[in-house]
Image (spheres, rainbow, N blue to C red):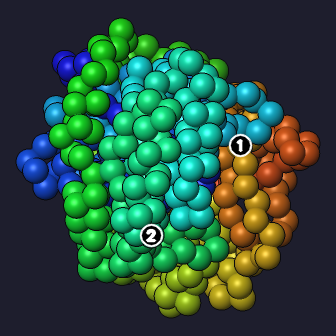
Amino acid sequence: MVNSAVPRLVVAAPSSGSGKTTVATGLMAALAGRGLAVSPHKVGPDYIDPGYHALATGRPGRNLDAYLCGPELLAPLFLHGARGCDIAVVEGVMGLYDGAAGEGELASTAQVAKLLGAPVVLVVDASSQSRSVAALVHGFVSWDPEVRIGGVILNKVGSDRHEALLREAVDSVGVPVLGVLRRAPQAGVPSRHLGLVPVAERGSRAVEAVAAMAAQVADGCDLEALVGLARGAGALSCAEWDADEVLASSVRDVREAPEARGGPKRVAVAGGAAFTFSYAEHSELLSAAGAEVVVFDPLRDGELPEGTGGLVIGGGFPEVYAAELSANEGLRKSVAELALSGAPVAAECAGLLYLSRELDGMPMCGVLDASARMSERLTLGYRDAVAVSDSVLAGAGTRMRGHEFHRTVVEPGAGAAPAWGVRAPERRVEGFVERGVHASYLHTHWASEPGVARRFVERCRTS
């Protein structure tokens, strides 16, 4: 049983670009460097930051998303991730009070901090202000009395004089300054069309970046005071999330899911630099449902793992590696043969592109009669969705929440049997259900509907 009073804090900011990732990742690495077992978490659906968190701590980076999973699951999922840890650090998303559009505080960092009973450390970009920082901090402290801002870290401070002015201003608000970071480009991480470049693509450079973040935070922040703040968080009143227990208690769709038979089935999960987007709970649920989960790399492996009975291809950046993926003809053929056999295949976003006929003119697996290409337009946002067609993941009518995040277009956008009906921003159908294939742009979190994993594994056994 995990310690429900695990020390914890949330690293937040007034807005994106203030330095949350640098501070949160650096703090995780600095604390881990002192011998603490650190549990890393990220508010929202982001897949990239958790990769840096994992590198900093040696543990899986886990997401806390109240929109995808529901507020009631946040604390149990947090405790699951924090099992056996000395301290937990949660990196926020956007500005502290920014959440799902039009949904009030839902999915905001502030909501997560309240659900976890965790103190907040506010990271402020002080590069273009001095005394005005007091008004900014005062506003964030007083906006929601249920959010406890326990300290401020001043980022991008220019000089000793600048620091003195800032400290004097923040002191007048009654909030302690727990750190001051000077401008340090070496701790930065490069970005491109969908945000930071993932850890898997950067190799030793990612290790160096995390080390630089750790050094910057260790030098500029009061680590003892931050740990003391985290230890002030009280016990949570819920039980931790457990994949075996939630599968046992979830409702089986008796109309659509056949009875399981046979032993464990091997489920291949795409990984490597081209497919870095996945939630750790998905593999845990698959394992709990009786699958043997094996990770493979579509950039390097010439065929699917021996004995593969099901395939999961999550998100990532196939557009960056289109030429290499196309050149791996052996694996493309292996994937196509598995799909044509009727075996279960679940593909999200990048997986959808990989299963298409072509991507930017380069041959892909050809499982779907669709063409994919890069686009100038960013598609981004939460989605309410309903399953349109019976599939290996869900029966028709199943409702789930998801998230879209891509700069690509697939034509047509839906097959004769679409995967999902999406309500906003406009009513539409999207994705493909063909044979055992479920392919869609929508990223979902299976912890919100654990029967998805059980249904998938049962189909592996009966296909």
Q: Amino acid at mark 1?
A: Tyr
Q: Residue at x 56, y 81 (%)?
A: 320
- Nearest the viewer among 2 and 12 is 12
Q: Does residue 229 show up?
A: yes
Q: Give the label on residue 456, or none.
A: none
Mark found first going from the N terminus, 2 or 1: 2
Q: Say whether residue 186 is left or right of residue 449.
A: left
Residue 209 placement: quadrant:
bottom left
Which quarter of the rendering shows the N terminus? top left
Q: Is residue 198 above or below residue 51?
A: below
- Nearest the viewer among 27 and 290 is 27
Q: Say whether residue 447 is left or right of residue 62.
A: right
- Nearest the viewer among 439 and 457 is 439
**SS for callout 2:** loop
Distance from disc 2 to disc 1, alpha carbons, whole Å, reads: 38 Å
Q: Amino acid at mark 2?
A: Gly
Q: Does residue 450 show up?
A: no
Q: Say whether residue 115 is left or right of residue 262.
A: right
Q: Residue at x 65, y 88 (%)?
A: 362
- Nearest the viewer among 197 and 262 is 197
Residue 352 at x, y percent in the picture: 64, 63
Q: Residue at x 41, y 64 (%)?
A: 161
Q: Is residue 327 above or below residue 454?
A: below
Question: Residue tagged by mark 1?
Answer: 382
Please identify the residue farthest to the right as the structure is shown.
427
Which is in the foreground here, disc 2 or disc 1? 2
Question: Residue tagged by mark 2?
Answer: 158
Residue 450 at x, y percent in the picture: 49, 29
